[in-house]
Amino acid sequence: MGLSREGGPTGVMRYEHMEIIRLLGIVAALFESGQPAREEFDRVHASLVALLHEHNMKEERIIYPMTDRMTPPPRLHELCRKIQEFK
């Protein structure tokens, strides 16, 4: 699309991917500590669930349609075929 990796919709999505990974790391560290503090776990869990929900909505409403529009039909059909074969 002519945008930098940090710009536009994909830049936002990349940032959110990093934030999801960071929050999952916190969850893992809490469990590795033995007895995670319930309040901290609940806070991180709520943040992660909210971010995943928002992120998924952006993918479905922006990224997927944009990808469909920009992908040449023969390539799109090939990708769909490969996804069906994978199932």
Image (spheres, helix red, strand yellow):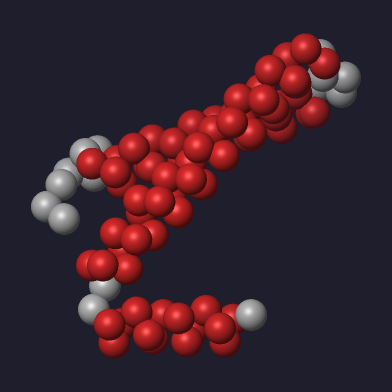
Please provide percent x and percent y for residue 23: 59, 29
Q: Quadrant of residue 39?
A: top right
User: Looking at the image, is 64 positioned above or below residue 22?
Assistant: below
Considering every residue shown, the one lying at the far right of the view is 35
Please provide percent x and percent y for residue 36: 82, 19
Please provide percent x and percent y for residue 81: 47, 87
Of the 4 image quadrants, the one containing the N terminus is bottom left
User: Looking at the image, is 51 positioned above or below residue 86?
Assistant: above
Q: Quadrant of residue 69?
A: bottom left
The answer to whether one can see residue 28 in this image is: yes
Whether residue 5 sits left or right of residue 14 in the image: it is left
Q: Quadrant of residue 11?
A: top left
Whether residue 57 sits left or right of residue 3 in the image: it is right
Whether residue 66 sits left or right of residue 30 in the image: it is left
Please provide percent x and percent y for residue 82: 49, 84
Whether residue 2 sits left or right of residue 73 in the image: it is left
Of the 4 image quadrants, the one containing the C terminus is bottom right
Considering every residue shown, the one lying at the far front of the view is 61
- Foreground residue among 40 and 65: 65
User: Looking at the image, is 51 positioned above or below residue 55?
Assistant: above
The answer to whether one can see residue 18 in this image is: no
